[in-house]
Image: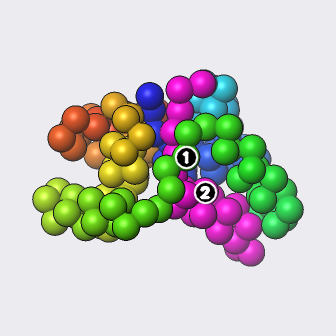
Amino acid sequence: MQFVDTNVLLYAVSTDPAERVKAERANAILRGRRLGLSVQVLQEFYVQATRPTRADRLSARQAGDLVTSFTRFAVQDTTVGLVQAAIAAQDRFGLSYWDAAILEAGRMLGCSEVLSEDLSHSQDYDGIVVVNPFA
C-alpha cells in the first residue's frame, strides 16, 4: 500500500497550466486502489485548496466534497498513539513534527511507501520509503 501526501491531492485538482503534467500524474495515482492517507492530509488538503490566495481556489463545498470522496481510501485517524510515534520519529529522523506524522500514519496503515515531493526521494525511514512521484 502507498501513503498519499497532501501535495498529490492538491496537484490532482490544480488547473494551473504549469502543473498540468503533475496534475495528470496525481490523478493517475488516485485511480489506484491500494492507497492510504490520514486525517492530517485531509485537513491540509482542505485548508490549502480553499486558501484565498490560491489562484484556482476551491469553494468550501467543493473541497469538502473532495475530502469525502478521498475517504474511499484507507484513512489513518489522529490518535494519541500516532502523536507519540510522530514525536519519537521527529527526534529519531530530525524531521518536522508534521512530516514525522505523515510517515507514522503511513506506517500505522501498513504502507511501504509515502508518495510525496516534500520529503527526501528514496529515503528509507525504518521500512517506509519516500517516493517523489513527480521527479
- Hey, which residue is sitting farthest bottom in the picture? 52
Residue 128: quadrant of the picture: top left
Label number found at residue 62: none
Q: 125 or 116, which is in the foreground?
A: 125
Residue 99 shows up from this direction: no
In-image side of 78 versus 96 (left or right): right
Q: Residues within 10 Å of mark 1 (few under 14, many from 20)?
A: many
- Hey, which residue is sitting farthest front in the picture? 80
Q: Which residue is mark 1?
A: 75
Residue 117 shows up from this direction: yes
Residue 134: x and y in percent read 48, 35
Q: Which residue is mark 2?
A: 42
Q: Residue at x 43, y 63 (%)?
A: 79
**Magenta-tinted stretch:** 33-55
Residue 91: x and y in percent read 16, 65
- Amino acid type for the residue under numbered disc 1: Val
Q: Residue at x 77, y 58 (%)?
A: 63
Residue 18: x and y in percent read 65, 45
In-image side of 122 versus 6 (left or right): left
Q: Residue at x 37, y 67 (%)?
A: 80
Mark nearest the camera among 1 and 2 is: 1
Q: Residues within 10 Å of mark 2 (few under 14, many from 20)?
A: many
SS class, disc 2: helix
Classify the position of the N terminus by image quarter.
top left
Marks 1 & 2, CB-CB < 8 Å contact: yes
Cα distance, mark 1 to mark 2?
9 Å
